[in-house]
Amino acid sequence: MPGCPECVSACVCSDQIWLVYKGHPMQQFLAAQAASSNSSSPAPPPPPLRSRPTRREPQQSVNKEAAAMADEQQELTRAFSGLGGLGVEETALVSALGRWRKQPEKRASFRRGFPGFFSPAPTASGGAITIERCEDEYVRHLKTEFSRFKNLMVLWAMHPWERDARWAHRALHKHKKHQGSGCILVELACTRSAEELLGARRAYHALYSRSLEEDVAYRLKETEHAGLLVGLVAAYRYEGARVSEDLATEEANAISAKPGNNEVLARVLATRSKPQLRATFRIYREIHGKPLEEDLIAVGGICLQEAVRCLDAPAKYFGEVIAGAFKEGADKQAKAALTRVVVSRSEADMEEIKEAYVKQHGAKLVDAVAKNTHGHYRDALLAMIGK
Amino acid sequence: MATLTVPSSVPAITDDCEQLRKAFQGWGTNEALIISILGHRDAAQRRAIRRAYAETYGEELLRSITDEISGDFERAVILWTLDPAERDAVLANEGAKKWHPGSPVLVEIACARGSGQLFAVRQAYHERFKRSLEEDVAAHVTGAFRKLLVPLVSSYRYEGPEVNTRLAHSEAKILHEKIEHKAYGDDEIIRILTTRSKAQLLATFNHYNDAFGHPITKDLKADPKDEFLKTLRAVIRCFTCPDRYFEKVIRLAIAGTGTDENSLTRIITTRAEVDLKLIKEAYQKRNSVPLERAVAGDTSGDYESMLLALLGKE
């Protein structure tokens, strides 16, 4: 283990961190930190939104100065890694900058106390002097966390149509292998109004010299969802409230008759108007006693399931996407989804999303966001979510 | 291109409305007057006339027309007077409800219109029928045709001239392969035909011809009775040579005993402001007879006069 001679007592390398490294050192470190911060009780009233885990080192009372430094390092660690949340705590970073000016040894000990992110690397002069170099993974991680605020602002400034077109393009071209890409397209196609979807398709023409359905069909041609996604993306649904109960019953029966056959369902989902579809889902629930999504889980069509959820109750769907970003072990796509949902829905149905979130998770959305994000990113999100 | 002739000094809209009103009033109808006015106004003028007529007389112009005249003449005048997008919406609605395999109406609307125009048709369809076009097509069309026609009417193709040659080569190869295996309803064929831009498709078909020595439509003639192949050929021809495609439809409508008035009316009213002149030239070339003469020989009365007016007769 990397030696840290002068700061054995002060650095954060308490026993629990030196676990057997199964995964990447950084992930292990983060997991350990998360564990230590979750397992300890919250500190006495800290400055708002920056809770510090209590330190477990037995020497803390012994060396008060060392403890203070450990405290600062914890803050900095937290601020830098966005532990337990998204974004970085810019104010803490800047104040650490100020406090540690002209004290390179403090920075050095911070780096040494951060073993997941910095590892010792011998310099050219024969390994006698080592520096703590940044892990590449950590640099990428930092970039992501720091740029959350930037991404949010850039997206906020764009026209909604351009936003949607860019998300669709990225989903198709960058995240092709990831199953989340299909979900982004389903989200765009099903939660936007007919005019918004048309606008997004126009923007796609202008930006990429291709039509959206062309790219969807081409990029997803080997997968089973190709037909469904092209249909969803090309739809121009009637926007009136007219609903035919007979038709809804007929289609609910048609769907039940062939539960494994996705063609009927794909056709219905891609062409009927939203109020008509909701009637169909309602009747399906009445006939079978459980919602259509549940039956679709069994059949395994994840895109179909997403489509049904988005069309039936978009606010609830968005609430779940947001909650997914806060979960332990959420991946990059899930976290990026937070920005996407808040920016795209802040002027649309944010109120309904807040209500649905409270119902689903028992906590208010603003509280959850405040707890799980940091810095300017957090402030921007809260501003977009509103009171 | 267009055969519609509009007089160089167009009377004021109020005059037109007055004349039309007079044509409807009293015993009988002055059909010649109707033809001489409506048959010589372009889409914008017709729209203005309809608006002014409704404001002045409190009644829709189309309503007056249906009350006063009937039969093929009425259908021709009504279809002609409508806005192009509305007209296509009405035709599409009919085409979907009365669909049978081999029915060409939906294919024509989806492929022989520009991307933006097709979207205008979908919007007009919403307003008029309170449902979406793809909904009705999906509900009334069955089988492999549905897999082809629903994406075809929902497409919003890119309209630019950019062509990816490599892609054209590879997609021509894919088409050839699928056709060789007689997999005419294959997903790939449908994908290419229903999503690629017009310029890209033309490049693909050209490359098909270059690489395999004959046009793609030739390979789709394996079975003359197969309606799906007929539909595929119609799709391709509407893209590559719309004037010859429409010439053929008209030729088949006129030829032999009896006349298919619906097809004749449809083509003439929808193409009079677009490319009816080219269709006339193609007809002359193929049949050695001017189209006006053929139409006059096969139709009569006011219906004939209306069609001839739209064909450009003074």
Image (spheres, rainbow, N blue to C red):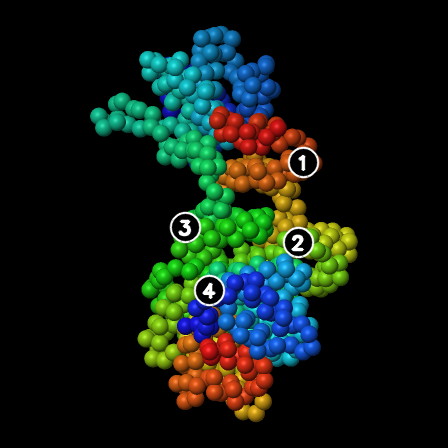
Classify mark 3: helix, strand or loop.
Answer: helix
* Residue located beneath label 3 in the image: A207
Label 1 to label 2: alpha-carbon separation: 25 Å
- For the point 63% across and 38% down, which residue is it? A353
Residue toward you, A15 or B311: B311
The residues bearing labels 3 and 2 have C-alpha atoms spaced at a distance of 31 Å
Q: Quadrant of the N terminus of chain B?
A: bottom left
Q: Chain of mark 3?
A: A
Q: Nearer the viewer, residue A54 or A204?
A: A204
Question: Is any part of residue B155 visible from this angle?
Answer: no
Query: Does label 1 or label 2 sit earlier along the sequence?
Result: 2
* Residue at the spot of label 4: B114
Residue at the image position 59 percent from the left and 14 percent from the top: A44
Q: Secondary structure at mark 4?
A: loop
Query: Please, what is the three-letter code of the amino acid marked with disc 2?
Result: Gly
Mark 4 and mark 2: Cα distance apart in space: 26 Å
- Quarter of the view holding residue B210: bottom left
The residue lying toward the viewer, choosing from A254 and B194, is B194
Q: Chain of mark 4?
A: B
Q: Amino acid at mark 4?
A: Gly
